[in-house]
Image (cartoon, grey):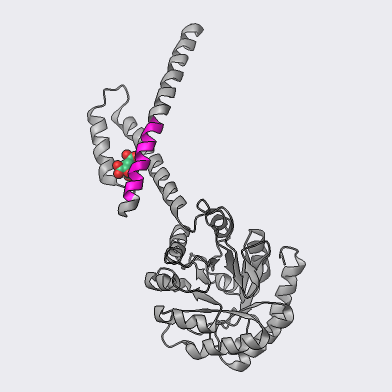
Amino acid sequence: MSEQLNLLRQKLDGINEELLRLLNERAVVAREIGEIKEKQGVPKFDPVRERAMLEELTRRNPGPFKDSAVKHIFKEIFKASLNLQEEDHAKNLIVSRKNQPEDTLIDVKGTVIGGSSQVMIAGPCSVESYEQLRTVAAALKDAGIKIMRGGAFKPRTSPYDFQGLGIDGLKMLKEVASEFGLATISEIVHPDHIDIAGQYIDIIQIGARNMQNFELLKAAGQASIPVLLKRGISATLEEFVHAAEYIAVSGNTQVMLIERGIRTYEKWTRNTLDISAVPLLKQETHLPVLVDVSHSTGRKDILLPCAKAALAAGADGVMVEVHPDPQTALSDAAQQLDIPQFQQLWNGIRESGLFKE
Ligand SMILES: O=C(O)C(=O)C[C@]1(C(=O)O)C=C[C@@H](O)C=C1
């Protein structure tokens, strides 16, 4: 009896081997189809083709497997083929780690982002005046911070809210940055302003609301300065990576990604900080990955643990909003730190031992 069992099992082993060979042969063909689809720019998933194959297979099914079992098995095979095609697609992206295993390093006036050290970017939500900007710049300089943020173009939820000082704000950033020896980052919202931005700032920020503004992404791809791309409020990581690819394929590979919280049902924070985005983006792309703790939380009291979590998860830097007098700020009054609060946060981050200088 057991000898017969052994023989049957040996027979199954042989069939398994043959099935495995055939499955892989099939996978090679599916891959080739995937490459053709990639070139044609058509979707990899083809439900009509899948349904036609299932109908044909069940029509020809001699049994003893029921049609439902045949369908189930083949659906899994189609899914595995599709995964293979999608993996190949991801490998082809310029921003993919599979395409470039080594980290992209971005040098901003001597500060390298994406290397062995981490960066702290701080500054007001909006540029409001010279005085406001100079006060923050002086505090940042004292704290050893090298990159200052400040919004000149402010895409706001309400058209009645402060919209920013525009080009005048960029000019203020340049003047104050050169006085204090800082590099600057500011959001650009219109493709026509990409060129001008290069005259005044060191990093172009593409905001969350514009993450899929493809004309803006293409324009940023033609800029000669680095771009910090924010994750859209409802963007999947795949969409985020493809938005970065738009910039890279247009010619600018100096791209940094920043997780800034996503929209969920949670109300205790302004957005939900998706900490898993950090290791996933580091794994899937070679771009520097930062975390905006101010926008993701929308509150001041949990910035330290969130910044520590970001750094521990492998973020290349943290961004935080600082204002000399947050209560009178023209935007994001609730989430901006005053200068002593920023100093306290910064000390806490450094004392944690998580920040690689
Ligand atoms: O025939 C195709 O277009 C394929 O991409 C191959 C294949 C398959 O494995 O059979 C894979 C995914 C598609 O959803 C449909 C079919």
Which residue is at a point 55% across and 87% down the rendered structure image? 127
In the image, 180 versus 136, the foreground residue is 180
Q: Looking at the picture, how far across and down is residue 207, in whole percent?
A: 48, 74
Q: Is residue 336 left or right of residue 213?
A: right
Which residue is at a point 32% across and 34% down the rendered structure image? 71
Which residue is at a point 74% across and 70% down the rendered structure image? 348
Q: Is residue 281 magenta?
A: no
In the image, 35 versus 334, the foreground residue is 35
Q: Looking at the picture, how far across and down is residue 342, in whole percent?
A: 69, 78
Q: Is residue 29 magenta?
A: yes
Check the image and report above or below for 187 versus 51.
Answer: below
Which residue is at a point 45% across and 79% down the rendered structure image? 194
Quarter of the image that includes the C terminus: bottom right
In the image, 322 versus 247, the foreground residue is 247
Magenta segment's dominant SS is: helix
Q: Looking at the picture, how far across and down is residue 266, in whole percent?
A: 52, 66
Q: Is residue 325 visible?
A: no
Q: Is residue 322 left or right of residue 222?
A: right
Q: Quadrant of residue 179?
A: bottom right
Check the image and report above or below for 73 versus 281.
Answer: above
Q: Looking at the picture, how far across and down is residue 334, in whole percent?
A: 58, 81
Q: Which residues are magenta?
A: 23-37
